[in-house]
Amino acid sequence: MKTRVLTAIVMVAVMVPFFVFSQTVAFPILMGFLSLVGVIEMQQCIGVKRHPITLLPLCAVAGGLPFLARYVGEAARFSYLFAVVFSVLTFCFIVSVFSGKAYPVDQAAMAGASTVYIAVGFAAVVMLRDLPFGEYIYFLAFIIPWVTDTFAYFSGRLFGKHKLIPEVSPKKTVEGSVGGTLFAVLLTALYGFIVGLVSEAKPNYLALVIVAAVVSVLAQCGDLVMSLIKRKFGIKDYGKLFPGHGGVLDRFDSILVTAPFLYFLIDLIPALSLFA
């Protein structure tokens, strides 16, 4: 526990300057670095690290997508994202065709899909930052999953009786899941209130509550997805970058889901605009 706490303090201290200067190139650099490390961790997990002809292009996509999200014009952004995503998947399948048994098609599919999943997740954090009132919104991509995870743990310890999905994550309970979501909703509403006090932004509390509830549930699904993959490949942690926490994918697993869906909800449904 001491190691986990110390690591968390160091993580926050290192990330704070990047958040303070999130409107500059520093932010896509941070997201690009996390994306790159996350993709390397995943490829090592599934065995693609042995194939540099595949790994290097996937790393380039992982590190570059957050920059594309920031510096490609909004009108063309999704066209570029679609092109990159489709190209990654096509590339992996083509390499599989010409490599024979050295790079089987199921491994190629997993390599391509996981790269897209990770890189788009971190790129979406940058896209959230660049929305109107994005300097307040993108924090929710971190706040909601981490509050959900923390209070799901304590709620589960206090009230947990019914296992959620024991074959994937034996310690998670239904009561913990519900408690995590309830606290995420309450603290998101409180966050909106604080933002309203310290800025000219006017919080939309109904939207904050709805978005927090949806994103909290998705955050837990993202956590379970990564747990399922770890069980499939027989590993405990994805990496060792954060002592006591594991790797990037162990620490940011939920954010890979919350950031894109938070962006989709806000950008595609005007009624869910969180601030005005």
Image: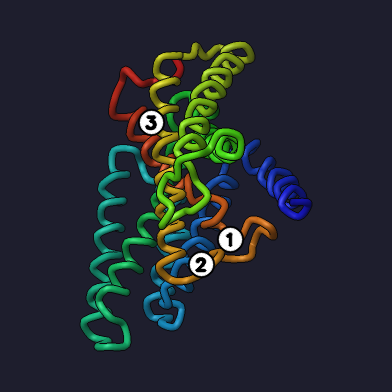
Contact between labelled residues 2 and 3, with CB atoms less than 8 Å apart: no
Q: Is residue 239 left or right of residue 215?
A: right
Q: Name the residue beneath numbered marker 1.
A: 247
Image location of residue 194, percent across then percent down? 61, 16
Find numbered disc 3 in the image and state the secondary structure of the residue it sits on.
helix
The structure residue drawn at horizontal position 43% and vertical position 30%, both measured from the top left corner, is 131
Mark 3 Cα shell of 10 Å, populated few (<14), some (14-19), many (≥20): some
Relative to the observer, which residue lies in front, 53 or 47?
Answer: 47
Element carrying mark 2 = helix
Of tags 3 and 2, which is closer to the observer?
3
Q: Give the x, y percent position of residue 182.
A: 49, 26
Q: From the viewer's perspective, tell me whether residue 134 is left or right of residue 7.
A: left
**Which amino acid, mark 1?**
Gly
Against 3, residue 25 (above or below) is: above
Q: Rounded to the nearest whole Å, what is the CA distance between mark 1 and mark 2?
A: 7 Å
In the image, what residue occupies the spot 33% across and 34% down?
A: 264
Q: What mark, if any, has residue 214 been given in the picture?
A: 3
Q: Which residue is mark 2?
A: 41
Q: Label 2 amino acid?
A: Glu
Q: Quadrant of residue 95 in the image? A: bottom left
How crowded is the residue under tag 1: few (<14 C-alpha within 10 Å), some, or many (20+)?
many
**Disc 3 and disc 2: Cα gap in Å?**
28 Å
